[in-house]
């Protein structure tokens, strides 16, 4: 059975700049959120498929592991769509 992983109380925020920090970056920093470089795709795959090598994502996985909720994916029909 397939599963999905949720972070119901957290969000991944990506900001990109060509040079100096933006106002959004400064607000995040003031609230204690510092930049972290990681592959969202690679991290997600390593969490959904634990048999894959995950050494590149161990640090970020260990940071978010306490907040994860693993849930089975149930089949949806077109009636379930909003």
Image (cartoon, rainbow, N blue to C red):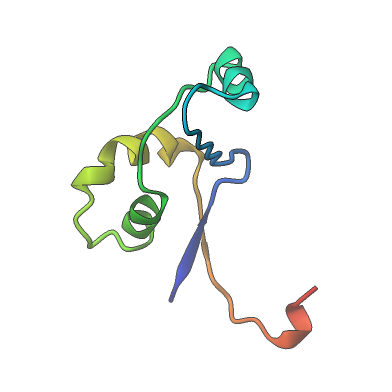
Could you tell me which quadrant the N terminus lies in? bottom left
Identify which residue, 69 or 24, lies in the foreground. 24
Tell me which residue sits at (59%, 38%) in the image. Answer: 10
Residue 42 screen position, x and y as percent: 33, 54
Could you tell me which quadrant the C terminus lies in? bottom right
Residue 24 screen position, x and y as percent: 63, 26
Tell me which residue sits at (44%, 73%) in the image. Answer: 2
Above or below residue 46? Residue 55 is: above
The extreme front residue here reads 19
Above or below residue 10? Residue 81 is: below
Residue 67 screen position, x and y as percent: 51, 39
Above or below residue 75? Residue 15 is: above
Identify which residue, 36 or 72, lies in the foreground. 36
Q: Is residue 52 left or right of residue 45?
A: left
The extreme bottom residue here reads 78
Tell me which residue sits at (22%, 44%) in the image. Answer: 56
Rendering quarter of residue 59: top left
Q: How many marks?
A: 0
Q: Is residue 69 left or right of residue 51?
A: right
Rendering quarter of residue 12: top right
Q: Is residue 12 left or right of residue 78?
A: left
């Amino acid at each position: 059975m397939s599963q999905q992983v949720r972070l119901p109380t957290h969000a991944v925020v990506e900001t990109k700049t060509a040079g100096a920090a933006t106002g959004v970056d400064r607000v995040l920093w003031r609230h204690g959120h510092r930049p972290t470089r990681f592959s969202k795709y690679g991290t997600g795959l390593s969490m959904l498929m634990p048999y894959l090598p995950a050494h590149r994502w161990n640090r970020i996985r260990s940071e978010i592991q306490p907040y994860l909720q693993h849930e089975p994916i149930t089949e949806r029909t077109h009636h379930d769509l909003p």
